[in-house]
Image (cartoon, rainbow, N blue to C red):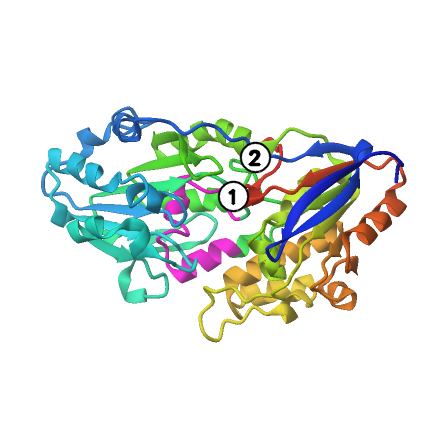
Amino acid sequence: MRTGPLKRCSVSFAGQPEELLIPADNITAEITFTDFPAIGALRERLFHALEHPFGCDPLSTVLRPGMKVAIPVGSRVTDWMLGVRHQLGLPLLDYLNAHGIRDEDVTILYAAGLHATHAVAERFGSKLQQRVRFVVHDPRDERGLAYCGVTTRGTPVWINRIAAEADVILGFGEISPTVQGGWCGGGKIILPGIAGKDTIETNHAYTLVPQNTLFLADRNHMRLDMEEAADLARLTMKVDILINSREEVVDLYAGDFRKAHRAALPKAREIWLTRMAPTDIAVVYPNEVRERHLSRSLYGCLEASDWATSDGGTIILVLSAAGGWGEPPEAAPGESCGPEILKLPLEEIGRRIVRRQGYVRGLVMLYGAKKMLSKKRVLLASPGIAPQEARAFGFAEGFRCFDEALRVAFGIHGPQATVSLNLTRGVGWRCGPWVED
């Protein structure tokens, strides 16, 4: 590596500061999160968006007295938006009342798919839940599902029966990068949001297609399948928000779920993606929560670094892994997704996905990670994972400290090697390089 000034980068290792030293002259890109200011008059912005939507009729022209309305709500930010943080749920119900919809005809669906659900009641608040029916969607409850048809890719679509029987489905979600679907938001509120387990797992099995789907929408086969499912479910209108690092709303879009989503993506890219040329070496840190467990640190990090590195490039994944592997909390009993899975050949993990042997969502995450481990040279720098264990997982090499991993990477690429950094914290762990759809 070059001699000269060192850039000191501080990350958190199990709650304690850890300093990474990197030759400053070699750094050609730093992936960052763009923090836009929060918008004001959020209630007025919401009502204006409902009346001036992208690509569909105003909501007020759709509503009729006696209609049943289902409101699936995302599991990360929009629950707080309608609930205790921004308290938009009650004004929204007033809006529906003003157009002839009674509270008893409204159901809020917590649309978490197969994700674990935490602190749902606290995030929505008691006033909202007492006013209308509130249901936490259970994708494993087959009696609570209704069949809507099959997508052209062969995904059978079961969705929450309450939504299927509603006259209007008004979805609320948030747009940020995600591996399955490329971006959150849009039709993803239906699949996986309120879909059945079999529907979710069939769609997620499309991760077997070699293409890296992260940051893609129109070129993302998994998203296109999700959007077909949303068509079959008759998603009436979708509200999507963009947020800053404090989870404040910086913009809001409503309308046809495809058109509103695509209208939001240019600004979403400005928030989450950094314009850069691919580098020889990419240094990536998962974030202060995910870095404690190897399994949770793998989700999205390697796919983003694949876009950030040139062909033949090297990725250095740095984390403490102080908690070891870390089982996914949402896995059902008997659906283990332990460290032995990542040690399997890629084709065997794929076989288990196809045969539904284990927690498929977890298997899909590990398949994506293994696919990247097979595609790119990935070094693991972690005091919590022994080097021999790292090699068994499929890493090119494991190191107890970052300095040694960086030295080896420069030994491969030479002293003039270019380096990119993705050390974003908090919500910024989803950030990545600029990718055109």
Disc 2 packing (10 Å; few <14; some 14–19; many ≥20): many
In the rendered structure, the answer to whether residue 415 lies left or right of residue 228 reads right
Looking at the rendered image, the quarter that the N terminus falls into is: top right
Disc 1 packing (10 Å; few <14; some 14–19; many ≥20): some
Q: Residue at label 2?
A: 33
In the rendered structure, the answer to whether residue 21 lies left or right of residue 228 reads right
Res 139 → quadrant: bottom left
Q: Residue at label 1?
A: 427
Q: Magenta residues?
A: 180-204
In the rendered structure, the answer to whether residue 104 lies left or right of residue 142 reads left
Tell me the distance, in whole angstroms, between the alpha carbons under discs 1 and 2. 9 Å
The residue lying at 74 percent from left, 68 percent from top is: 389
In the rendered structure, the answer to whether residue 72 lies left or right of residue 300 reads left
Res 37 → quadrant: top left
Where in the figure is residue 233, as x and y percent of width and height?
32, 47
Whether residue 99 is visible:
no
